[in-house]
Every structure is written in structure tokens, then in C-alpha cells.
Amino acid sequence: MRIPGSLTQVIGIANAVVITVAIIGLSLLPGEPRPPAAPQGAARIQERPASPGPGSPGPGSPEAGPSEAPAPSTSPVGQPPGVVATPDFARQVRANEAGLVPVLMYHRILAKRLASIDRTPDQLRKELERLAERGYVPITAREFVTGDIHVPAGKYPVVLTFDDGHPSQFGLGADGRPLPGTAVAVIQDVAARYPGFRPVATFWVNREPFGLRDRAAQETAVRWLVDHGYEVANHTWGHPNLRVLKRKKVSEQIVRVERLLKKLGAPPSQTMALPYGSMPRPKKAARTGSWDGTRYDFAGVFLAGAEPSLSPYAKKFDPGAIQRIQSNGKKGECRKWCSQYWLEWLDKHPGERYVSDGDPERISIPESLRGNIVTKRGLQVIAY
């Protein structure tokens, strides 16, 4: 069952309107205080060098020797060991790496919701627990769009994304741990209780990441996230509607955040999310450009709704306009467009969902889907 093109256009436009109205309304509100296991013996395990553990000396530590500034960490967090998939193995785990992937979109995480797109810590926790119990494994937006998908065989990738860098998403306490009730604290807690659930997500931030104005505090927050496997990337400087800006102003909005993130210790952004899901003109200005001598070139640009994304290996996958799903229940405008609806839909249509073969070097698909895959990525295609 495929989603009709006409329906996709209708729900996409409608959901973008809903998101825009909700975010504008949110900006006017008072601010907040600062699946089964893989068969045995079916595939060979492929070892990967171990990354330093929590107790190991990190860059810039006394044990590691002096350095001017620690480099941003690129160590994968919680990635499973790879396997070498075969046609028989792919068939056993029902691999379908041409399937749909839910990219979930969150904004504020508040004890008391003030806008329709807010979620409470309890709602976030329950949704993540349901994902873990159903066999979903989080990956970052960067990992998704670049096809660097390390998910155990028979499991499903999910991308957790958070817009605007709000204080409710992340903050550190005096003990150096994520503040209770923040999005990161909830993710870490769920991952601790579900070992296969990777504690990773993508945070798209503006000029004051997580509501922090002090540069040292911003750097501490961003470095903590990056060093713990989270992606911190570009959501423009002032969260404008890019559609109404001239191209030079669009590039300025993007470059200013890139320069800030570099100062804070984050690697160059490979992804960005469009404020309000609004595409600039021309469309390519969101993905690549330059301003004041600084260039940007994103691997992927993400929208604000309203359906699961195509696989990054699919021929029709558009890295300049990647779909997301608003996290919400099945009420009002979210009856058919938000996370509860789509996760239930994917459960009812398992043949449409991305199922990993456990081998990041190969793309495994049913033979009937061979024509849907882009092979120029250099990865071997296994069709069974």
C-alpha cells in the first residue's frame, strides 16, 4: 500500500499550516525558566574498533596530554556490531531497506502543555518506551540522511528530532547530569532501561542554544551533547520564515549559526531543519550557499511534516525536502497526520516499513523492490 500522491500533498500543506500557526502562537506565550532477535549463525559479526568508555581520558584531559582545544567527538554511541548480510539472512529477518522511516518532530517538553505541539515529559517517555518495545532503534538525522544506518538486523530505525533548542530539551544540573524532566534526561533514562535503544537524537538550534546566553554555558551544553552522541545542528539564527527572505538573507541566517556552532565545539552541520517547514526560493538556498566568505553544504534539509520519510536509498528520496512527523496523539488536526497515527499505520503495514539487515555496507530488499533503489552510493544491493 502506497500513500497516494494527492493525499500526500493535502496532508503536507495542512500540517505545515498547523505547525506554522502553533509555532507562532507558541512564540507569543510566556517564556519558561531558564522485533525478534537475529537468527544465530546466519551472518558473520564484523568487529569495529571500540570507542573510549566513560572512564577513559578524553581529549584535553590531563591523562591525554595538553591540547589547545578538544576536537568535536565523532564517536558513534551505542552502535551495534555490524554483520555481513547474505540473501538467506536478509530473507530470514525480512529486511526491507527501501521502506519508510519515521522522523519524529518535537518542540518544547513541558510539565504543563501551553501549545498543541508541546509534549509533557511523561508523554515523551511513553512514546519512546513504545518505540523501544516495538523494535525501533534511534539514529541521528545525520546518520539517516548519509545512509550511515547501524541498526541491528530485524529492527527499525527512528529519528528523534527537536526544534528550536528550548531549555526544556536540555540543561545540565550542578552534578553535570541532564536536568530531570528535560528531553535528554528522558531519552537517557529510557535507553538505560531498554539497552537496545540508543540514546541519540538531533537538536536543531538557533542563536541561543537551550535558552543559554552565556558563551561558556553554551559551549558546555553543546560539547556534552556532541560527546554523548547527540547531533547539534542548524535551525537558522533567528527562526524566520525563509520563504519571504532574499537568498542572501537566507544564507546569512544559516551561516551565523554555523559559525556559532563551530565556536561551541560542534562539527559542521550536515543537516538543517526549516523554520515552520517553509522552503526558501530558490529551494537549493536552504541546502547549499555562502555568506561573508563562509560556505555551507548540507546532506539533508528537513520539513515540518506530515508523513514518514522515504528511505535514503530510495530513488524518489529528496534530501532537500525530507518529511517528518509531529509527535502527538490522534485528536483534532492530528487524527491522521501525527506520530500515534503513523506508528500504528506502520504496525498495520509492516511491508512498508524500513527493516534493517544489520549490515551498513549492504542494502537488502525484496526482489520486487529492486527498481526502487539508488545503487550509485557504492553499497552492494542484496535482493532476495
Image (cartoon, helix red, strand yellow):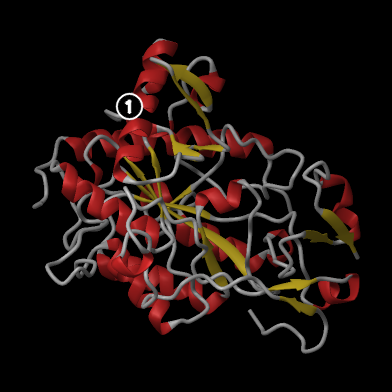
Judge from the rendering whether residue 53 lies leftward or rightward of residue 205; answer left or right: right
Res. 328 visible in picture: no
Check disc 1 and give the amino acid type: Arg
Foreground residue, 160 or 348?
A: 160
Residue appearing at x 76%, y 62% in the figure: 96
**Residue at image location 46% in from the left, 81% down from the top:** 194
**In the figure, is residue 274 to the left or right of 238?**
right
**Dot 1 lies on which element?**
helix
Q: Residue visible at 24% across and 67% down?
A: 178
Residue 130, percent across and down?
46, 74
Q: Is residue 168 above or below residue 36?
A: above
User: Which residue of the protein is positioned furthest toward the front in this rendering?
Assistant: 65
- 21 or 279, nearer to the observer: 279
Which quadrant: the N terminus?
A: bottom right
Name the spot of residue 32 as percent of width and height, x first: 11, 50
Give how far across and how far down residue 109 sits, in percent. Answer: 25, 58
Quickly name the residue at label 1.
256
